[in-house]
Image: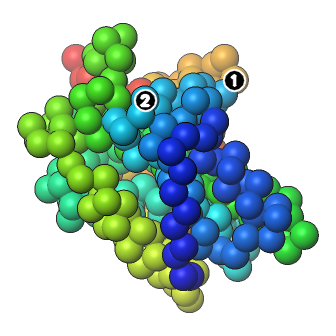
């Protein structure tokens, strides 16, 4: 994959622009970056607040050769890449909450939204990544649950440095994922960086139902295994996971 970065001052959403470019025939590796988003999108129809200059708002077009059943692994791959990029560029050590939120001290620093797009060259994936860089990325109402690089380190990171590290880690992890044995490898790499992989008490809300249990690793396609109080293993493919503190 050869990255090609296109910068914008303002966009409704970098994911929407990347999807438009993918439909117009953009190659894999086209990256869209905006200084602000006026309609940033989060998972589960949420809004991603994106004030000017406060975060990295980034989307990349991928045209994976991976079997479609393994495409959920792309978001785990992105989480591993962001983890390593933040460590390299900002010396920030993050935890990964399944499937792909990056946290510091249980507060969200980065979110990832993968969306598929039908194009004339076949189905593509737009991988959107939002990283809170400065304190201005967080309105008062989010400060209990979200954080930024600046809040963690006391230093305002250079966007260009974070972007450079992110693109480089994405290329490395994406190419590794698509090699033989890459799907098993990314699960191992994800588990090495996540306290949610094994033995974590969690509560999950899915389709209005709540399930509590202990995490027991990932399935080969990235789904989360959870052992319920009754000892049954449930496999989660979606849903919102919250951590539960042991009594
Ligand atoms: C989440 O809900 O955690 C995912 C948030 C993803 C936000 C990023 S910011 C860049 C890209 N463009 C969007 O509109 N969303 C993603």
Q: Is residue 88 above or below residue 143?
A: below
Q: Secondary structure at mark 2?
A: loop
**Residue 162: horizontal and vertical position, in percent?**
30, 58
Q: Which numbered mark, 2 or 1, is in the foreground of this view? A: 2
Whole-angstrom CA distance, mark 2 to mark 1, is 31 Å
Which residue is painted at 56% across and 57% down in the image?
32
**Residue 52: horizontal and vertical position, in percent?**
41, 34
Color style of the picture:
rainbow
Residue 192 can be seen in this image: no
Looking at the rendered image, the quarter that the N terminus falls into is bottom right
Numbered circle sitting on residue 51? 2
Report the residue that reaches farthest toward the bottom.
180
Relative placement, left or right, of 21 versus 87 is right
Numbered circle sitting on residue 207? 1
Looking at the rendered image, the quarter that the C terminus falls into is top left
Residue 1 can be seen in this image: yes
Q: Earlier in the sequence, mark 2 or mark 1?
A: 2
Q: Quadrant of residue 188?
A: bottom left
Q: Are marks 2 and 1 in contact (CB under 8 Å)?
A: no
Q: Find ligand 1 in the image and state its quadrant.
A: top right
Q: Secondary structure at mark 1?
A: loop
Nearest the camera: 225 or 108? Answer: 108
**Residue 55: horizontal and vertical position, in percent?**
37, 40
């Amino acid at each position: 994959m050869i990255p090609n970065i296109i910068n914008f001052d303002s966009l409704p959403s970098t994911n929407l622009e990347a999807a438009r470019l993918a439909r117009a025939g953009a190659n894999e590796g086209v990256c869209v970056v905006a200084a602000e988003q006026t309609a940033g999108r989060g998972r589960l129809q949420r809004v991603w607040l994106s004030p000017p200059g406060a975060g990295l708002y980034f989307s990349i077009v991928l045209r994976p050769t991976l079997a479609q059943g393994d495409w959920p692994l792309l978001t785990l791959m992105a989480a591993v890449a962001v983890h390593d990029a933040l460590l390299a560029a900002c010396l920030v050590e993050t935890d990964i909450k399944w499937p792909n939120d990056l946290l510091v001290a249980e507060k969200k620093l980065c979110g990832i939204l993968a969306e598929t797009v039908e194009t004339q060259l076949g189905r593509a994936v737009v991988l959107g990544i939002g990283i809170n860089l400065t304190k201005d990325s967080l309105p008062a109402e989010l400060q209990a649950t979200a954080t930024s690089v600046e809040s963690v380190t006391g230093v305002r990171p250079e966007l260009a440095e974070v972007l450079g590290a992110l693109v480089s880690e994405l290329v490395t992890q994406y190419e590794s994922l698509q090699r033989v044995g890459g799907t098993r490898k990314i699960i191992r790499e994800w588990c090495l960086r996540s306290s949610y992989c094994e033995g974590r008490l969690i509560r999950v809300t899915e389709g209005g139902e709540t399930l509590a249990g202990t995490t027991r690793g990932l399935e080969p396609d990235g789904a989360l295994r959870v052992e319920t109080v009754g000892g049954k293993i449930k496999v989660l493919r979606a849903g919102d996971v919250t951590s539960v503190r042991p009594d």
